[in-house]
Every structure is written in C-alpha cells, then in structure tokens.
Image: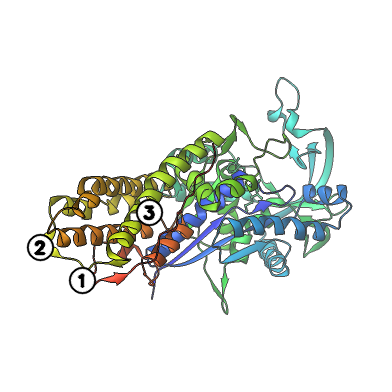
Amino acid sequence: MAERFFLTTAIDYVNGSPHLGHAYEKTLADALARYQRLCGRSVFFLTGVDEHGQKVQQSARALGLDPQDFCDRQSGLFRALWDRLDISFDQFARTTEPRHKEAVQSCLCRLQEKELLRFEEHEGFYSLRQEQFVTEKERVDGRWPEIFGEVVPMREPNYFFLLSRFGEQIRREIESRPDWIVPEFRRNELLAALRRPLQELCISRPRSRLAWGIPLPFDERYVTYVWFDALLNYVSFAREGEGGTWWPADLQIIGKDILVPAHGVYWPAILAALGLPLPRRLLVHGWWLNRGAKMSKSTGNAIDPLPYLDRFGSEALRYFLLREMTLGNDADFSDEKLLQRYQSDLANDLGNFAHRSLSMIARYRGGRVPGWIDSEAGQSERELASAFDEEAYRVAFDQGDTGTGLAVAWAFIGRANRYVDQAAPWKVARAPASEKRLDLILAILAETLRRIAILIEPALPRSSRKLLTELGVSEPPLLSRAVFAPPRESYSAGAPEPLFPRVEG
Ligand code: MSP
C-alpha cells in the first residue's frame, strides 16, 4: 500500500476577497501535495475557509445579506480562484458545515467533562474592532494602537480553556523535535513564547454580542470564538470512511502571523487536551508584500491575482510565486519581476527547449522519436543524462523549499539547452553519413524533455501534462520515472505548441 501523506493549509477568513497572499499559500501547498504524489504517496490535501466571527457578521450586515448567504458567496470566490490556479485539494473545509459544528460541540463537551473549561468573569479592556480583550501591556506610550480601534472597559463572564496546564508539556515536546517547525528560526520564536507564563484562553462570546458562531452545547447563551472553532477544522474534515481519520497531519502550512500563539500554542494545547497527537510538522511561510507593506483589506492594498491570471496564465503565476519566495522570508511582488521570470525562465529556458526539441523531431523525422542507439553516445550525452541532481531536488521539496527545488530543475533545463547548442542537430542534419548521430541527438532531446516534464509537474501541472501528451507518454508522472531511460524503439510525438507565448512588457 502506498505511504500516506496528509497536508493542510490555513483556512481563509471569508470577510474579504482572496488576494495574492492567500493564492501563494494554496499554491505552495498544492505544489507540495503534487510533489508527494510524484513520489508515489497517497495524498490527502485539505484547505478551506473560516466562516464564523464578528467580522463576517458585520460584512454581511453591511451588504444587507444573511451571514450564510454572504459566506456562500465569498466561499465561491475562493473556490473559483483555486480552480483557476489548479489547486488539487481533496477536501474543502467550510466551518459552517453541520459536520464541523457537531465535531466542535463534541470536543467542547469532552473538555467540559475533563474539567478543562472554567466559567469566570473577566474584567479588563476590550477592543471593539478586534473583538477581543486586550491587556495593559499592549498600550504604546499610554495609548491603544490604531489596530484595536475603540477600546472600552468591560466586565463579562466567559468560558476559558485552561491553556496554562499544557505550556510545559508543549514546550518539552517541541524541544524534543528539532524539525517540528520549518524554518528553524520560527521554532526559536515559539520556544521563547512558551517560556513565558500562559494566560487561559477565552473561547466564548455571549450570543447577544456575537450571533454568528457555534453555540456551546452546554450553555446556549454563548457561542465559541474564532480560534477554537477554526483550528478544529483540521480534524473535523480529516475523517476517512467509517471512523477512520487522516489525522495527524504530516504537514501543516501556515503564514508567520498565525504561528504564535494560534498554531504553536493553542493548537498543540487543544490537541493535548483532547488526547490527540501533534501534527508531524509545521511549515511557516512569510508574506508577500506590496511595495514593502503587508497586504490587507483594511489598508486597501491587497493584490488581486485575477488580472495576473488573465495576462500571464495560471502556470506563470504559480511558477513565479513558488520560485521567487525564499522559504520563510517575505518577498516583494512586482509586475516587472513577474514579467522577467516569465520571459527568462518560462518562455526562454523551458519554452525554447521544448519547442526546439519537438520541432526538430517534426522537421527531421516527421514527428517520430528515433530509438536509442547506445554505441553512438559520447561524453556530452552521458553528462546530460546525469545532470539532474535528484537528491537536491528531493531535499528541497521535502523541506517545502520550492524556490530551491525549482532552481535545481532549472539548472537541468539550462544544461539541456547547452546540449542542444553543442550538439547542433541542424549542422548534423546537413553533414554526410550522420543519420545515426542525428537519431541519437533527437532521442536524447525527447528523453530529456520527458524527464523535465515530470520534474516541473509540482509547479506547472498543465505544461507538464501538455508535454507528456505531446511525447505520447500516458503513464502518470512519478519521480521514479524521471531517470534517464531512452526508448529502444521509435515512437510518434505530437506537433509542438508554444507553452508560453510572448506577452507584452
Ligand atoms: N482564518 C485564519 C486562519 C485559521 S487557520 C485554522 C486566518 N485567515 S487569513 O485569511 O487572515 O489568512 C489565511 C492565511 O493566509 C494565513 O496563513 C496567512 O498567513 C496567509 N496570508 C495572509 N496574507 C498574506 C500575505 N500577504 N502573504 C502570504 N500569506 C499571507 O488567519
């Protein structure tokens, strides 16, 4: 039986529309899911949307819509974008689905039975904009920062999850797992946070203030609040068949803003309280910035991916996002950089190699790829055959480092283009008694293109499929098939179509 691999992404708030940051995270997850499939694993890829909370309620009200209708509409926008980007998820989580609500309620009952919830009155300051209690420590020069909006004194009884009981256990567990978080500097950040005393986590809001949430099963006056509901999607949508589950996740992909405390403290504590294992690994990515600033709905600088999809196509946007971001860091988005990658890496390197190879097979051999003739192979053929560094490719993708993984694939594409220049089939074609030599070169080009088509699959699924079809390959792409194995017999290849047509600068 194939080895299993379960990966998740953060679920996006539906109060705004999807932007480039959301598109990056889902594309990253998709490339890693495809890479795992390429390795022959059986993959379960979960993504979705976060539909409860004050902001959704407010946004719906502002449009005069019922919150559920608003969520249906917004979720549709996310799903439509994932379709255009070829995000190959297996399950789409919506936190307003009945099965999620039931799972959350059953978890709440379990915590209540285990006496891990406490009902108590909390007195403090409350941010109306962030819809949360804030502490004196958060004041800057005696004033509440802008992001909190109006802050008012408030006294309110609520349910608290006894988070502090788990701090020590989580810290020890994370300390014992050096690769639990990628990249490593994020792990240090989390461990530093876990060394400080933890406050209990308020998990409820009175229904009178927040109606749009999941009611507490033991107290109808309250609904559960954001994180407790949202985090549990990872288990409520991981069910498999009768009573089975995909949990624990092999990989959870999140942005740097939701590591501490959400996924690094609350989530491990909730899991420990429920007696469930921790995920095997967290991959924490950085942000895409718009001219140095974080994109957000409130500042109105969010980049909409749609015009880029219209202009460059999904493959180019995927490639750019996966290649240009250094894992864990932030990256600045710009039209110029995208255009440059399009022209150099896609149109020139990959597009040219594919086009040259297939059109020479069409021109010189009427579209038949010649069989392989061992005795004709020389030094440059042998060098090209061994030029792909599979180990480096695997290490990079195993770490979630798509930029490095793609750089390894592109080094091979660069080598392939140099081979064409050196072998110069157009000269060989004119030389006398060189039929066998030309056969060999064309067979090598087709074989190299077949290997490249497999290696680009995680980032460029459409181009990969197109090339494999043109080469007459019907088997699904697998990394184990990306080894050099030229066919002994000749076979037919299709006519080349340009993969990346010219776009105007
Ligand atoms: N709903 C919560 C997550 C709950 S997970 C149980 C949330 N939603 S969000 O819509 O604000 O963000 C969703 C994901 O998108 C997060 O991982 C976040 O880091 C990521 N991004 C949001 N803006 C981003 C960029 N500008 N760049 C890259 N990713 C960013 O948080």
Sequence-wise, the earlier of marks 1 and 2 is 2
Residue 9 location, quadrant: bottom right
Residue nearest the observer in this picture, 290 or 246: 290
Amino acid type of the residue tagged 2 in the rendering = Ser
Amino acid type of the residue tagged 3 in the rendering = His
389 horizontally vs 61: left or right: left
Residue 212's disc is: none
Give the residue at mark 3.
355
Sequence-wise, the earlier of marks 3 and 1 is 3
137 to 222, vertically: above or below: above
Residue 375's disc is: 2
Amino acid type of the residue tagged 1 in the rendering = Arg
- Counting from the top left corner in percent of width and height, residue 174 is at 46, 48
Residue 184 location, quadrant: top left
Q: Residue at x 20, y 71 (%)?
A: 488
- Counting from the top left corner in percent of width and height, residue 470 is at 40, 65
4 to 402, vertically: above or below: below
Give the residue at mark 1.
488
262 to 127, vertically: above or below: below
Q: Residue at x 59, y 64 (%)?
A: 235
Q: What residue occupies the far top of the structure in this picture? A: 141
- Counting from the top left corner in percent of width and height, residue 396 is at 37, 49
Q: Residue at x 59, y 66 (%)?
A: 91
